[in-house]
């Protein structure tokens, strides 16, 4: 029987990315946002969230706790609720998915999970060498550039002010994180960042974690998760989806980063109309209705539209949440009046806001679209959403060429 795998993620794009890796390695893959139904099940068969036939052959369930932007104590409570009734012996692997550049209340979450599962050590390998993201000598670099000198220094919620991995993680009340070189042995207790600058280093850490699965909580990014699946005897067997099917396409970008400008430039080159959020307010009903009309005209005319926030970064309390709520309201209104075959959601916060607004909580993963990190999923619940195909990717990844081809 194929292994049964449980993953706890802190945002929806990361959850989708990890589930798609499971699909790549031949596992039935599902994403679950509704913690009540998922966490209430004491057995692995019920907790997988997968159809009965797939439960018999194993699979991967990824729970999105949507805790990336929460206070550490609140985030810790959220992950505890997600796994409180999980029996570790029902799963071959339990993994904590974190942001690949160490954003979010990571220490609070991994400590909460380690306590619930009675794990003495946490091994965190968040960086993805396959994407040029490495940690060496305690320093996080992207394509050789220190993290605090990249665009992540301007992240609206977690600006990188250092490239030191331990500093990026912050302080823990009980465990002080320390970095281990690839040649180090994994201690039996503590919280450790496994340094890695290439795929071999990641695979070595996966081997050490696999030998101590009953006492070590593995945590981190996509590369580490894939290496752990290989340690379970799996091999990549499902090819990427070459291109999405034809049909009306709505791109939704909730980021206020510099990447948004690049995305808008690309959309214009591809003759995709850009429909920015009105500048003066995030919530006035009349302005949102006018915005909806602009988007619908674009879809009627050319079958494609890009929705963006496209305004200066606002660091006032609650501003990101207000903007995401307005964006989700816009998408809900468009979907109520127009058929959209492909809903392209960029960034975990954006995807979560839209899915929450639409009442979409359960998803089946079809696979990765052309490149790792861009995921095609189908909605499994909500009368207005069953079967709807959506695409999700992290905000720092680019859309592959295939999505621009109509």
Image (cartoon, rainbow, N blue to C red):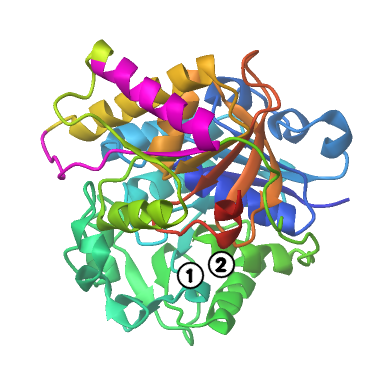
Above-or-below relation of 304 to 154: above
Residue 15, position as x, y percentages in the image: 54, 45
State yes or no: residue 279 in magenta: no
User: Residue at point 28% right, 54% down?
Assistant: 261
Q: Closer to the camera, 306 or 386?
A: 306
Say left or right for 93 vs 321: right
Q: Is residue 62 above or below residue 233?
A: above
Pick the front one: 331 or 274: 274
Badge 1: how crowded within 10 Å, few (<14), some, or many (20+)? many
The residue depicted at 55 percent of the width and 74 percent of the height is 205
Left-right relation of 261 to 267: left
Place residue 266 in its image quadrant: bottom left
Which is nearer the eye, 9 or 395? Answer: 395
Circle 1: element type: loop
Is there any visible trace of residue 298 in the rendered image? Answer: yes
Query: On the image, which quarter does residue 360 sit in?
Result: top right
Reply above or below: 178 against 364.
below
Residue that extends furthest to the front in the rendered view of this protein: 301
Q: Are marks 2 and 1 in contact (CB under 8 Å)?
A: yes
Magenta-tinted stretch: 287-316
């Amino acid at each position: 029987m194929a292994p049964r795998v449980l993953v706890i993620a802190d945002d929806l794009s990361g959850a989708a990315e990890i589930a798609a890796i499971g699909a790549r390695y031949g596992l039935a893959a599902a994403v679950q946002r509704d913690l009540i139904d998922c966490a209430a099940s004491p057995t692995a068969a019920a907790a997988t969230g997968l159809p009965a036939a797939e439960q018999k052959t194993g699979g991967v369930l990824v729970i999105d706790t949507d805790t990336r932007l929460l206070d550490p104590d609140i985030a810790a409570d959220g992950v505890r609720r997600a796994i409180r009734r999980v029996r570790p012996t029902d799963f071959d692997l339990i993994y904590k998915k974190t942001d690949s550049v160490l954003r979010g209340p990571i220490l609070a979450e991994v400590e909460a999970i380690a306590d619930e599962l009675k794990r003495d050590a946490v091994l965190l390998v968040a960086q993805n060498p396959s994407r040029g993201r490495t940690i060496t000598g305690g320093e996080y670099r992207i394509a050789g550039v220190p993290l605090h000198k990249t665009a992540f220094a301007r992240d609206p919620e977690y600006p990188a002010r250092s490239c030191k991995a331990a500093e990026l993680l912050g302080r823990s009340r009980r465990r002080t994180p320390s970095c281990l070189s690839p040649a180090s042995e994994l201690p039996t207790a503590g919280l450790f960042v496994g340094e890695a600058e290439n795929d071999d280093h990641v695979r070595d850490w996966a081997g050490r974690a696999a030998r101590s699965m009953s006492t070590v909580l593995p945590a981190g990014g996509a590369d580490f998760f894939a290496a752990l699946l290989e340690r379970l005897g799996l091999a990549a067997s499902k090819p990427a989806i070459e291109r999405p099917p034809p049909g009306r396409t709505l791109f939704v970008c909730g980021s206020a980063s510099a990447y948004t400008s690049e995305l808008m430039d690309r959309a214009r080159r591809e003759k995709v109309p850009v429909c920015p959020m009105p500048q003066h307010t995030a919530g006035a009903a009349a302005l949102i209705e006018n915005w909806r009309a602009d988007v619908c005209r674009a879809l009627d005319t050319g079958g494609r539209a890009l929705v963006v926030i496209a305004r200066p970064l606002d660091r006032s309390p609650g501003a990101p949440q207000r903007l995401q709520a307005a964006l989700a309201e816009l998408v809900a209104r468009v979907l109520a009046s127009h058929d959209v075959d492909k809903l392209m959601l960029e960034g975990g916060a954006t995807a979560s806001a839209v899915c929450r607004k639409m009442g979409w909580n359960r998803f089946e993963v079809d696979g990765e679209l052309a490149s790792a990190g861009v995921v095609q999923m189908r909605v499994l619940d909500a009368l207005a959403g069953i079967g709807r195909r959506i695409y999700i990717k992290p905000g720092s990844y680019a859309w592959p060429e295939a999505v621009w081809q109509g």
